[in-house]
Image (tube, rainbow, N blue to C red):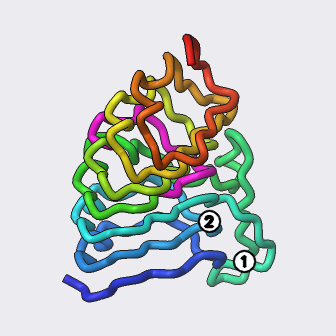
Amino acid sequence: SLFCFSVPLKYNCIFGTLPNEIGNMRSLQQLELEFNGLSGTLPDEMASLTNLVKLNLSEQYFNNWACTSSGGTVVNTMFVQGDEANGYNLGLSGKILGPQIGKLLSLKEISIYGNHFSGSIASEIGSLEKLVILSAGYNDFSGTIPQEITSLTSLRELLLEAQWKYQISGGLPKDIGSMKSLESLVLYALSMEGEI
């Protein structure tokens, strides 16, 4: 294992995919890679990062025309819907909030805003008792908000605003009013229905 506690690489020109070897960084507590040009799915090995407290992978379509490849050509990381064949980045993808998220029990912040993550929000999210921030808007999630999310008594921010394909549906979790720490609940432009 590598003894590294923090990787603060936000606002850079990093592009490509995250390597499987990231799972060897078992002592990692903060992974801050927001505002870069990463793409592809996250490696399964990330489930080994059980000491991770902060995960920020937001906005992997940050447009910085100063970014160049090693060959000197401009790397365009601008997010453009469905135009990956023309060299545009669609951000990170995969089922990041699937059942494997329940293994990362130390997490206090998950910020994955502005990518192409998909799938449903698994009931295992309710295992993350220390979670304070879940910022997951502008992705491609589907399904309903699981009832288990209401067991997150430390959660202050739940941000799930929509993008063009966002298919969160159903009603609010029955006990959402019991989340006493919740200060910000953003659910606009979803396909939800029912009573408040």
Where does residue 24 sit, x and y in percent of width and height? 23, 75
Q: Which residue is mark 1?
A: 67
Q: Tell me which amino acid carries mark 2.
A: Gly
Residue 123 image-quadrant placement: top left
Q: Residues within 10 Å of mark 2 (few under 14, many from 20)?
A: many
Residue drawn 58% across the image and 59% down it: 58
Q: Earlier in the sequence, mark 2 or mark 1?
A: 2
Residue 116 image-quadrant placement: top right
Residue drawn 40% across the image and 47% down it: 96
Q: Which residue is mark 2?
A: 37
- Region rendered in magenta: 110-125
Q: Nearer the viewer, residue 72 or 25?
A: 25
Residue drawn 35% across the image and 75% down it: 29
Residue 45 image-quadrant placement: bottom left
- Could you tell me how many numbered marks the image carries? 2
Q: Which part of the image, by quadrant, shows the N terminus?
A: bottom left
Q: Tell me which amino acid carries mark 1.
A: Cys
Up-down relation of residue 2 to residue 121 (above or below): below
Left or right for 22, reference 166: left
Where does residue 143 sit, x and y in percent of width and height? 45, 24
Residue drawn 58% across the image and 67% down it: 34
Q: Which part of the image, by quadrant, shows the C terminus?
A: top right
